[in-house]
Each structure stands twice: as structure tokens, then as C-alpha cells.
Image (cartoon, helix red, strand yellow):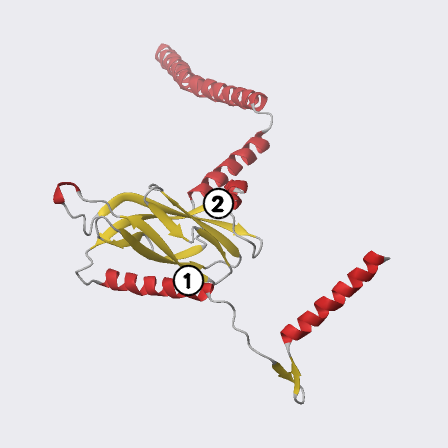
Amino acid sequence: MAIADQKSSSDNNNNNSNNNKVWGFFKLPFRGSNANTTQSSSLSTHLHNQNNPQVEGSNAHASNSVSSVARSLLPTRRRLKLDPAAKLYFPYEPGKQARSAIKIKNTSKSHVAFKFQTTAPKSCFMRPPGAILAPGESIVATVFKFVEQPENNEKPVEQKSKVKFKIMSLKVKGMMDYVPELFDEQKDQVSIEQILRVVFLDPERSCPALEKLKRQLADADAAVEARKKPPEDAGPRIIGEGLVIDEWKERRERYLARQQVEGVVDSV
């Protein structure tokens, strides 16, 4: 019995030692992996800090670049409202100079200069080619285009032409004389409002676009005639109790008085 007990105890000791070896075998890799992971993570962090000493600056630079890209993707704010919005309608009259019209309104809170450009400057021109509009002010511009004879007797009615017009805008400080050089001096501030395409209409066939074009052309002609007329003389004004003041007489008296003063100074 003693021998059997010794064998069983020795077997138990062997089993326990084997179990300890097995558990040790499974524990070692985990301990090694944790150590290796910790060492590798600390090493990568150290190398990253060495290679990128200014993490905050790089993040700020990246955020700035992202914000600039986002701003570039935003739609451009329009300063002008166009009517028609994207097309210029012309009556189709081959061999003649046709007219179109477009209403331009300043919808911004500042003075805005606008300018026309075309892909066919030899056969097209605008009146006015550009102007400065006050906030809320509008104007009807007239566009002239020579209509060429069609090829193969085809009528491009209701068809888009290859000719295009571009309207550009520029914010200015206030009312001033318009000169095209404004757009060359401030190229960075110029915005493209719209690219207009030419569409021909049959003058013998009534349609809403043709009727609207006729009304706009009539308004444009009336505005041109109004600018040609000299300012009407309002005549004498009555101020107070029957006192009559003639503005032209008063201006002449001030002018003569100024001339006399200048003559006295020159003689001295």
C-alpha cells in the first residue's frame, strides 16, 4: 500500500508539474506580447514625436487648408439679378442686325460695376458695355448682334448659338465714372455673374419670350431718349411770402462777383 501511495503521489506531482508547464507555456506568449506591444507602441510614439515636433501647428495648418477648400466650394454670392437669367433672345432675321435686351439690377448693399464680354466681338456689341449701379438700381442694357445667313438653308430658331456673353461684377466704394480699367486694376475682386447663351426666336411666331423682349426693348429705348433730353428748367421758385428767386440769375451774380474778386487780386 505504501508503494501504491507513493506512486499515486508521484503521479500527482508529475501531473501538477505538467499542468504548470502547460499554463506557463500559454502565459509566456501573452506576457511577451504585452511587453512587445508596450515597447513597440512607446517606440512608435517616440519616433512620431521626433518626426513631428510641432503637432499642433501641423493640425492648425491642415485645418486652415481644409477651410480654404471648403470656402472655394461654396457658391459665389451674386451681386446682380439678371432678367432673362441665362439666355439672350434675338429675333432671327438673317442679314440684319438684331437686338436683344436684358435687365440688370444691383441686389447688393454696395455700389457695383458690371461689364459685358462676348466671344464674338466683331459681330456683337452692347449698350452700355458697362456701368456702375447703386444699391437697388436697375438698368436695361441692349445687345446688338449681326445675324449671319444660315448654312444649307437651315433655320436655327429655338436653337442655342455658339456665341456667348459673360457678365462680370465688381464691388466699388461709391458712385464714380465707369471705366473698363476698373476690372483690370482689381482682378482678384471680380466675380463672373453669368454666362449667357444666344437663342433665336421666330419674329413671326408670337411667344412669351418674344413679347417680353419687345417690352424690354421699348423700356431701353425710352431710357436712352430720357438721357438725351436736357434737364427741364423748373423756372423761378417762390420762397416765403411771395419772394421770387431765379436760380440762374443768382448763379450769374455769384459768378460775376467771383470774377471781380479775382480781377482785384490779379491787379494787386
Q: Look at mark 2 in the image and give the residue it sits on.
A: 190
Q: Residue furthest top?
A: 3
Identity of the residue drawn at 44% across and 49% down: 115
Q: Nearer the viewer, residue 68 or 14?
A: 68
* Number of residue marks: 2
Decide which of tag 2 and tag 1 comes sooner along the chain: 2
Mark linked to residue 76: none
Q: Residue furthest bottom?
A: 241
Q: Residue at x 51, y 41 (%)?
A: 184
Q: Residues within 10 Å of mark 1 (few under 14, many from 20)?
A: few
Q: Position of residue 187 (x, y in %)?
A: 51, 41
Which residue, given by chain and number where applicable, does mark 1 sit on? Answer: 224
In the image, what residue type sits under mark 1? Answer: Val
Q: Quadrant of the N terminus?
A: top left
Mark 2 or mark 1, which is nearer to you? 1
* Residue 190 at x, y percent in the picture: 48, 45
Seen as rendered, the residue at the extreme front is 267
Horizontal side, residue 253 vs residue 159: left or right: right
The amino acid on which the numbered mark 2 sits, given as a three-letter code, is Val
Q: Name the quadrant of the C terminus.
A: bottom right
Residue 72 lies, with reference to residue 136, above or below; the image says above
Q: Position of residue 16 (x, y in %)?
A: 40, 17
Q: Residues within 10 Å of mark 2 (few under 14, many from 20)?
A: some
Is 214 above or below relative to 26? below
Q: Is residue 249 above or below residue 139?
A: below
